Amino acid sequence: MAYQINIGGEVFSCGENVDLLKAAKSQQVKIPYGCANGGCGMCKVKIKEGEYKIGLCSKGALSDEERQQGYVLACKTYPLSHLIGELVEY
């Protein structure tokens, strides 16, 4: 099943087995990224609504506290429902 993902007003679809960054890139939606492997934190997103699962990533890029507050890395996040989020500005 493909879910509707809205990050900062940009809408794209993403299946459960595809990370948000890959899905966004394939649909020409721009999410900043560096390593695309959970190590740099450039693709950090704050999820406001929806269910998701997070793959393994560096605690330096995404701390336990940030995870509890709803922050994720787009390159390591897989939707389990429609999602609404915002890009984190540096």
Image (cartoon, grey):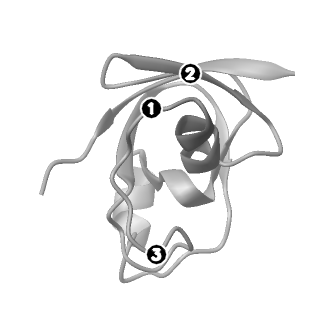
For the residues labelled 3 and 2, say whether their Cβ atoms are less than 8 Å apart: no
For the residues labelled 1 and 3, say whether their Cβ atoms are less than 8 Å apart: no
Earlier residue among tags 2 and 1:
2
Q: Name the residue carrying label 1.
A: 29
Report whether 71 appears left or right of 51: left
Report whether 31 appears left or right of 16: left
Q: Is residue 82 visible?
A: no
Residue that appears at 57% across and 25% down:
50
Secondary structure state at the residue bearing disc 2: strand
Say which of 14 and 26 sits in front.
26
Relative to residue 71, is residue 29 depicted above or below?
A: above
Report whether 55 appears left or right of 40: right
User: Could you tell me residue 62's position as x and y percent?
Assistant: 40, 69
Q: Name the residue carrying label 3.
A: 35
Report whether 36 appears left or right of 15: left
Q: Name the residue carrying label 2.
A: 12
Say which of 24 and 74 sits in front.
24
* CA–CA distance in space, label 1 to label 3: 17 Å
Type of amino acid at the residue the image marks with label 3 = Cys
- How many other residues sit within 10 Å of disc 3, few (<14), some (14-19) or many (≥20)? few
Type of amino acid at the residue the image marks with label 2 = Phe
* CA–CA distance in space, label 2 to label 1: 7 Å
Residue 9: name its quadrant: top left
Secondary structure state at the residue bearing disc 3: loop
For the residues labelled 2 and 1, say whether their Cβ atoms are less than 8 Å apart: yes
Secondary structure state at the residue bearing disc 1: loop
Residue that appears at 44% across and 58% down:
67
* CA–CA distance in space, label 3 to label 2: 21 Å
User: Could you tell me residue 90's position as x and y percent?
Assistant: 12, 57
Type of amino acid at the residue the image marks with label 1 = Val
